[in-house]
Image: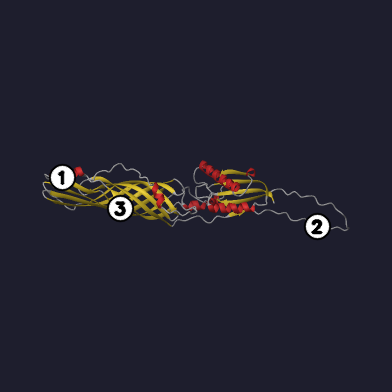
Amino acid sequence: MKNTHTLSVLSLAALGSLISVTAFAQDDYSPSYAYGGIALGQSQARIDEPRISARLAAEGASRSGMTKNETDMVYKIFGGYQFNRNFAVEAGYFNLGKFDFNSTTVPAGTYNGQIKLQGANVDLVATLPLTQRWSALGRAGIQYANARDTFQSTGAVRIPNATPSKNAVNYKIGAGVQYEVNPSLFVRGEVEHLRVNDAIGNRGGVNMYTVSLVIPLGRTTTPAPRAVATPVYVAPAPEPVPVAVVVITPPPPVVVVAPVPRRVSFSADSLFAFDKSMVRPEGKMALDTFAGELKGTIYDVISVEGHTDRLGTAAYNEKLSAERADSVKSYLVSSGGVDSTKISATAKGETQPVTQADDCKGNKATAKLIACLQPDRRVVVEVIGTR
């Protein structure tokens, strides 16, 4: 074998047409989880014809014809751990199948060979989210491959060792795409290149093209959302004034009640996916309920404040809180019937956390820290008016 053509990323857009997609509400799942999977596909190598001819020439023979099989079925079994949205470590077993050739020689004879390849690998897998469901993948790692050769000949060609074998450590690289069918099942399409040594001193490469089913294990989500409303103060009715005689009194003056603010705090995790600003179906239901409660209310102004936790940069959190506040404002106007001239949106970023400094320790975005900082991720809606 010898090096295959330069590794190129296959066009896998057709993969989407093979998946029966059922719409689902994407919850805010933890970015850290273990997973396992299985892959099937095709392997491709290249038989090194010049080296075979050189081997025959050393025996005083030449090649008069050849047939070869350079592809076979490949499968792999793997497991890994996703540390965050961008990086995972993965280990697995692969079987690249077998490749063979059959040649005729002059003087009259034959020279045939076959190689079988299998092994294990450890890879670092990088994930780049493209949409809520599609992600690009890249991988690099090391693999330990076992090559087992079998040679047969007739005529003048001699074979010193008919069944050599070789174990070697080499690199592997790959690229592909991943689609999240639902929170418990992913589908991948990948191209991978493995550097291999056969058992007779050749160094070459094998490509494998696979489709994988990936099953996340123990993936958790945040608690169910809740909205906390500040009760509206209602002034007690005035006590009746006793009279000793029947008199005609003018009607009491109209009491003007000062506008009373009402603040409702929505957990951002109930309205949006983690690190996103598009309102989810569950969030729309909560906002519809809130908009329904406003029916019949005489209000002067409604303000919407977006708040984030302290993870990430201040500039990024400011932008995310602005986008979330604008999304809530737009939904209340378009679907809740709120007067657009009386509602405003403000970005607070990470400047007004609910948690105290010692409540949630650490700066690394672990699942535990993300859950601890959940109260800081919120959208506060304040209504100033009277009924």
Residue topped by disc 3: 74
Q: Which amino acid does label 1 sit on?
A: Arg
Sequence-wise, which precedes: disc 1 or disc 2? 1
Mark 1 element type: strand
- Residue 39 on image: x %, y %: 34, 53
Identify the amino acid type marked 3.
Val
* Disc 2 residue crowd, few under 14, some 14–19, many 20+, Cα 10 Å: few
User: Image check: 31 left or right of 57?
Assistant: right
Nearer mark to the viewer, of 3 and 2: 3
Q: Residue at x 33, y 43 (%)?
A: 8
Estimate how packed mark 3 is, as few (under 14), some (14 to 19) or many (20 or more) residues with alpha carbons within 10 Å. Answer: many
Tag 1 and tag 3, C-beta contact below 8 Å:
no
Labels 1, 3: front one: 1
SS category of the residue bearing label 2: loop
Q: Is residue 264 left or right of residue 167?
A: right
Q: Is residue 85 visible?
A: no
279 displayed left or right of 207: right
- Could you say where residue 17 lies in the image, as x and y percent from the top left? 41, 50
Residue at 59% across / 52% down in the picture? 288
Task: Decide which of tag 1 and tag 3 comes sooner along the chain.
Answer: 1
**How far apart in space, not on screen, are marks 1 and 2 (Cα)?**
119 Å
Residue that numbered label 2 is attached to: 240
**Disc 3, SS:** strand
Residue 306: percent from left, percent from top: 57, 46
Q: Which mark is residue 63?
A: 1
Distance CA(mark 1)–CA(mark 3): 30 Å
Residue 88 x %, y %: 39, 50
